[in-house]
Amino acid sequence: MKFFRGRRVLTASVLCVCALGQALAGTIDPRPTPADWAALAKLPDWSGTWVPNITDQSRRIKADPTPWNAAAARQIKAMEAEEDAGRPRGLFVNCLPEGMPSWMLISHNALEILFSPGRVTLLGESDGNRLRRIYTDGRGHAADPDPSFHGDSIGHWEGTTLVVDTVGVLPQSFIAVSESVGVPNNGDLHVIEHLYLAGPDTLHDDLEIIAPHVLSRPWKTTRIYYRQRAKKYEILEGVCLQGSFTDGKDKDGNAIFVPVPQIDGNPKPQ
Amino acid sequence: MRRNKSFWVLFFKKELLFSLVALAAAGPRAQAHHSFAMYDPSVTIHLDGTVKEFQWTNPHALLWVVGVTSPGADPALWTIELPTSPGNLSRLGWTKHSLSPGDRVVVELNPLRDGQHGGSFRKMTFVATGQVLLVNLRDQSKTEAAK
């Protein structure tokens, strides 16, 4: 007994030292406890594949018009005129991620939402690396986050609503209303979202987009997703750049991707 | 085994030729998710022809058909862009085997505004069976029963 009691004391001491070490080293991903895992079962069920309501996306572009500032409005008007004239400027022809907030605003592709202790993860189809990590473990924003396409996202639950605050988005990331109309946020972007089930299989994302360099005031709008559970809706890999290559062989007979010349991101008739 | 220089020159030439042939056969690809405004939605034409290749690749699948848009015209190779990805097409009932080289088809498309032989896919009918393939993403905007 004495031996085991001694081992318990030793184990506790080691754990304490490790915890202290983690704290001192800035560790913010502690090992989840059984209670942490059990707590996930109390969250609303957001499983399945969520497909954007594209009809509603189009409707809301007119119903909740983007409050562009004067300079951005001039650019938007010119882009719309170019599109109407058959000379669209594809914003994403380089296959870089749509990023925040455009992914949520204009995507035609499905996403899935994963819960794990202290974190919600959004995984999207397309872009090759479309994901958002939303930390719900009580941490604050990073003091000086490296700008990224999807930004630094902190979340918390208010009942069954996930509230997400996002900063640290690359200034080049677009605020887009279609795949060919939009402007870069140009820095200091702040996005606040409320995600919640509006029906058994309907998810709403109420967005407030604050972009002081291109919007005259915060833009509030909503995007709607439908839940699908059928097999055919499972998320597939979607690597955007794959379409810029064709199948070929190298001199050793290996299967390789061969770059194909592109003209403004569109297939060129032969 | 050592090979003499002429063997490797010939080998490389053969592989290079094969790659170039494969490249030419595959044709150009769609790139990123882009606007379709270069196609004229006010004009719909019917292309009667034979599938050369069906490319099941992100971000937009592509179809090449050799055919005519008016009776008696010389057949031409048309590059037809589908409006979405294999993921979304799967949900609408398509697969990578939906079309095969040699299939006789009539494709309804919105042509390029500049008159080149390209267009945006609207609808397709197999001549042999009358089967119709469509792409309407908005059909996904309702929850289906899990199967």
Image (cartoon, rainbow, N blue to C red):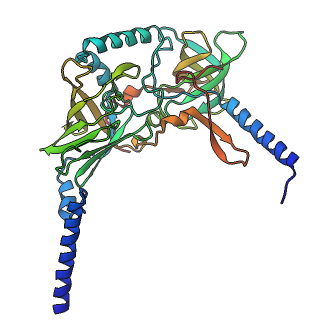
- Residue A169 sits above or below residue A40 on the image: above
Q: Nearer the viewer, residue A88 or B75?
A: A88
> Could you tell me which residue is drawn at 26 percent across and 31 percent down?
A224
Residue A228, picture quadrant: top left
Residue A168, picture quadrant: top left
B71 relative to B137 in the view: left or right: right
Q: Quadrant of the N terminus of chain A?
A: bottom left
Q: Quadrant of the C terminus of chain A?
A: top right
For the question of whether residue A262 can be seen, the reply is: yes
Residue A81, picture quadrant: top left
Q: Position of residue B12 (x, y in %)?
A: 78, 43
Q: Nearer the viewer, residue B40 or A10?
A: A10
- Residue A267 sits above or below residue B43 on the image: below
B5 relative to B112 in the view: left or right: right
- Residue A129 sits above or below residue A100 on the image: below
A19 relative to B50 in the view: left or right: left
Q: Position of residue A118 (x, y in %)?
A: 22, 53
> Could you tell me which residue is drawn at 46 percent across and 7 percent down?
A85
A66 relative to B11 in the view: left or right: left
Q: Position of residue B140 (x, y in %)?
A: 37, 31
Q: Position of residue B74 (x, y in %)?
A: 73, 12
For the question of whether residue A1 can be seen, the reply is: no
> Could you tell me which residue is drawn at 22 percent across and 59 percent down?
A37
Q: How many marks?
A: 0
- Residue A80 sits above or below residue B135 on the image: above
